Image (cartoon, rainbow, N blue to C red):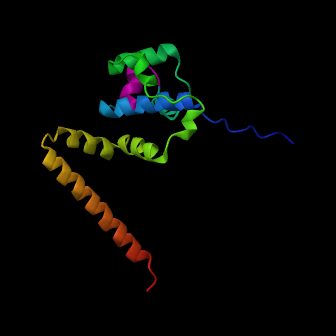
């Protein structure tokens, strides 16, 4: 019977570099297709880079860095060591996952433009209240009648 190949788990370093590519691309409001065309690959290849399933070569990383006008070292910033990558707290992952969405990025950009500290505090309070309302509503839906 032929053996089934093991599914290869991406290296944490490749995942981190891919995440940084995705974050920078989102921050620049650039599609995967646009980045792909700029570096001469398919958008599917960009997806694989961003997930860490395909490694980014040094020359390709230099091209990506040039597109984003950052040094190649940018993609390695805040990188945990290989062993520590699995120890990233869930809250940090939740935050980075949120900030990599279009909504999260838009909210972050808009919030950063609010200079008045009182307005920022009130906005944060409003968001917490809305989240609590949703949680309360969901709990009521789960209770048996």
> Where residue 47 appears, x then y in whole percent?
48, 33
Q: Is 94 situated left or right of 106 in this image?
A: right
Q: Is residue 133 magenta?
A: no
Q: Quadrant of residue 74?
A: top left
Write down the region rendered in magenta: 32-41
Quarter of the view holding residue 85:
top right
Q: Within the magenta stretch, is there residue 38?
A: yes
Instruction: Name the foreground residue: 30 vs 24.
Output: 24
Q: Nearer the viewer, residue 70 or 88?
A: 88
Expressed as whole percent of the image width and height from the top left, the position of residue 24 reads: 36, 29
Left of 29 or right of it: where is 32?
right
Place of residue 133 in the rendered image (x, y in percent of width and height, measured from the top left): 30, 67
Q: Identify the residue at horizontal 72%, vertical 38% (top origin).
A: 6
Q: How many marks?
A: 0
Q: Main secondary structure of the magenta part?
A: helix
Most foreground residue, 117 or 39: 117
The x and y percentages for residue 135 are: 36, 66
Relative to the observer, which residue lies in front, 8 or 92? Answer: 92
Residue 62 relative to residue 26: left or right: right
Residue sitting farthest toward the right = 1
User: Which residue occupies 21% across, 43% down?
Assistant: 111
Which residue: 30% across, 30% down? 28
Q: Quadrant of the N terminus?
A: top right
With respect to residue 62, does 138 lie above or below? below
Quadrant of the image for the C terminus? bottom left
């Amino acid at each position: 019977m032929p053996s089934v190949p093991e599914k290869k788990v991406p290296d944490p370093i490749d995942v981190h570099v891919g995440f940084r590519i995705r974050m920078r691309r989102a921050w620049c409001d650039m599609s995967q297709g646009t980045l792909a065309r700029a570096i001469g690959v398919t958008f599917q290849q960009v997806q694989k880079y961003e997930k860490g399933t395909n490694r980014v070569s040094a020359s390709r990383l230099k091209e990506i860095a040039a597109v984003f006008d950052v040094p190649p070292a940018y993609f390695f910033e805040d990188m945990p060591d290989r062993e520590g990558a699995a120890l990233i707290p869930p809250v940090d992952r939740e935050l980075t996952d949120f900030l990599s969405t279009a909504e999260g990025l838009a909210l972050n950009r808009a919030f950063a433009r609010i200079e008045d500290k009182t307005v920022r505090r009130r906005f944060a309070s409003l968001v917490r209240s809305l989240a609590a309302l949703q949680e309360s509503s969901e709990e009521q839906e789960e209770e048996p009648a």
